[in-house]
Image (cartoon, rainbow, N blue to C red):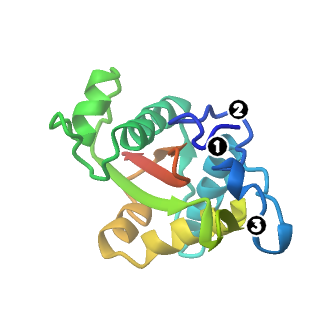
Amino acid sequence: MSSRVSRILSATVILSAVTAAGAGGAGGASQPPITVSELEQRINALVNGERRARSLKPLDLDQDLSKISRANSQDMAKREFFNHVNPDGETPRDRLSRAGYSCPKTTGENIFQNNLYSRVTISGNRKSYDWNSLEQIAGSTVSGWMHSSGHRQNILNRAYRKTGIGAAIGADGQVFLTQVFCG
């Protein structure tokens, strides 16, 4: 494997080590297998768990909204930015409109940047990683959103009925996540 993996990994490909030198984690542990689609589904389950805990209806996971969300996450990973507005000035509503998707009442968006690993240890020219599991990445993402008033408000908004969740992995192991809401 080259020192850098492709800029964005497909939703069906199991993620592999970020660098050949970093193939082993602390104590020789290897990176746990994480698929983008499983990560997206787990985040959706955790978000709906937060809603159910407050007697709110769960959000329906919409595949078209997920494609729009995933494309935004892939764009952030590819162009190395992290913002609700992309470098071309396109907003979340613009992205929905470009995709031909209409929300009758309201829309919202949450984004989050996470990592495949929590720590890198360098010893000479050898790197070892403390890899995050799928559960750790999903859990810390939703926890981060729930501890941010605007993101929390989106998750708990009664007006939203549908959501889409999209993840993308950057070459440096950054995990970009987008959740779009539609009501």
Where is the N terminus found, in terms of image quarters? top right
Secondary structure at badge 3 equals: loop
Relative to 54, say whether 100 is above or below: above
CB atoms of marks 3 and 2 within 8 Å:
no
Compare residues 125 and 70 and report the one nearer the observer. 125
Q: Which mark is residue 36?
A: 1
Q: Please, what is the three-letter code of the amino acid marked with disc 1?
A: Val
Q: Residue at x 71, y 34 (%)?
A: 13
Q: Alpha-carbon neighbours of circle 1 within 10 Å: few (<14), some, or many (≥20)?
A: many
Kindly give the residue lying farthest to the front in the view shown. Answer: 124
Q: Which residue is at 40% across, 37% downward? A: 78
Q: Amino acid at mark 3?
A: Gly
Mark 3–mark 1 Cα distance, whole angstroms, equals: 21 Å
In three-dimensional space, the C-alpha distance between marks 1 and 2, rounded to whole angstroms, equals 7 Å
Q: Residue furthest left?
A: 89
> From where the camera sits, is residue 49 visible?
no
Q: Are marks 1 and 2 in contact (CB under 8 Å)?
A: yes
Left or right, 91 with respect to 101, comes to: left
